[in-house]
Image: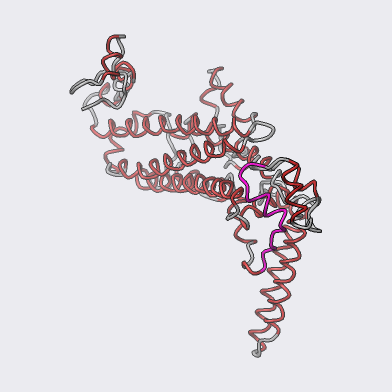
Amino acid sequence: MACPIGNGACPAGGQSNGEAAGAEKGENYWTYLHLDKILSAQALKSGAAGAVVHDEHLFIIVHQAYELWFKQIIYEIDSVRQLFMTEKLNERRMLDIIKQTNRVVLILKLLVGQIEILETMTPLDFLDFRDHLSTASGFQSLQFRLLENKLGLKKECRVKTKSDYSAPYHDHPELMEQIRDSEEQPSLAALVERWLERTPGISAKGFNFWDRFQGAVKAMLNDELKAAQAVANEAQRKEEVEAVNRRSVLFDSIFDVKLHDALRARGERRWSHVAFQGALMISFYRMEPRFNQPYQLINLLMDIDELLIKWRNNHVQIVQRMIGSQQVGTGGSSGYQYLRATVSDRYKVFLDLFNLSTFLIPRQYVPPLSRAMQFRLSHSISMGTSEAHEFLCDAGRDDDSSSEEAESAPGPVS
């Protein structure tokens, strides 16, 4: 059987040409993967104090596996962030962004399921070696905190604890530097926000999606109000009219910039008004070729948030199962109570994307694209100025779309 690493020799079985060449250089499967270090990193504390507790080995392996996967997730997130840090994102790199973000999603799905293996351990099994953990706790996982920071979880959204999550690393300057960098450098959420603000078509000088959308919502609410007022039953009529009025107030919360900013200050929204417009426009016109990949990314970002919430929830359940609801965690947190507080919207980095569905309207009310906008979104790579100008002339130059709209650099997919 050939080794999965082409340039290393398998401990057993045949060798490929690549493996033979690698063996001549002194490299093999064992040394390439540094398995001597990895497989000797399970030092059971219970053995040092007497009889080895069997399930401590499982406990260590599961958490080491988590940390390895956290490292890979951070590696992928850093790569995506680097692509977004360019002034104008090269549209050809969107496939890389989708691929790497999807890889993060698949790893998180694996991590969510991995807790089931840990649940084969009973509370008494855990109690046999829990004292040997001393103050060690998953609360202290540096990589998980780096991952949260790099995604865009803000300090003010974290549940307050007696000690800062970075406290265990205050005596390690190199690790503290990693924490500071993860807090100060642009997060994935901040970079995506900036990217969405450049969505083609939201500008008032071009297609002017936002004004069109407000007109469509007004028409929809007028139709709903007429239908409600036509209901014969007085009690039902009153109820349906109130429902339309409540919906109107809800839409006002996105049309009124000051109200949006106030909600943002309270943490109920995270992104700028313009970025929200871009995300909503992409959702409505996701079938257009140039919005297809951005829409895929939007869904993948929601998948990441959703899976992290599921992972946290699974963590809450296993902690309650193992130590109950009242004991403090080994790292000094309130244990179950602290973890339960992290399973909420405050820990959703991409909360605004989840809220998009609140403001979707039926297809018949969605503003139709102008011919110039259709042309612009039908090409995955922007056309040259002369070609765009020729199209506009052939189309009779839509009154609602300026030449600037056709010639300007694309937004999120540029």
Query: Residue drawn 37% across and 30% down?
Result: 64
Q: Is residue 11 above or below residue 64?
A: above
Q: Is residue 367 above or below residue 47?
A: below
Q: Residue 233: within the magenta?
A: no
**Which quadrant of the figure contains the N terminus?**
top left
Query: Residue drawn 69% across and 59% down?
Result: 369
Q: Position of residue 46 (x, y in %)?
A: 28, 26
- Relative depth, front residue between 150 and 139: 150
**Side of 171 relative to 109 (left or right):** right
**Side of 181 relative to 109 (left or right):** right
Q: Position of residue 20 (x, y in %)?
A: 26, 15
**Which quadrant of the figure contains the C terminus?**
top right
Query: What is the residue that sits farthest to the bottom in this orientation?
Result: 232
Magenta segment range?
365-382
Query: What is the residue that sits farthest to the left in this orientation?
Result: 13
Q: Is residue 391 above or below residue 129?
A: below
Q: Position of residue 381 (x, y in %)?
A: 63, 41
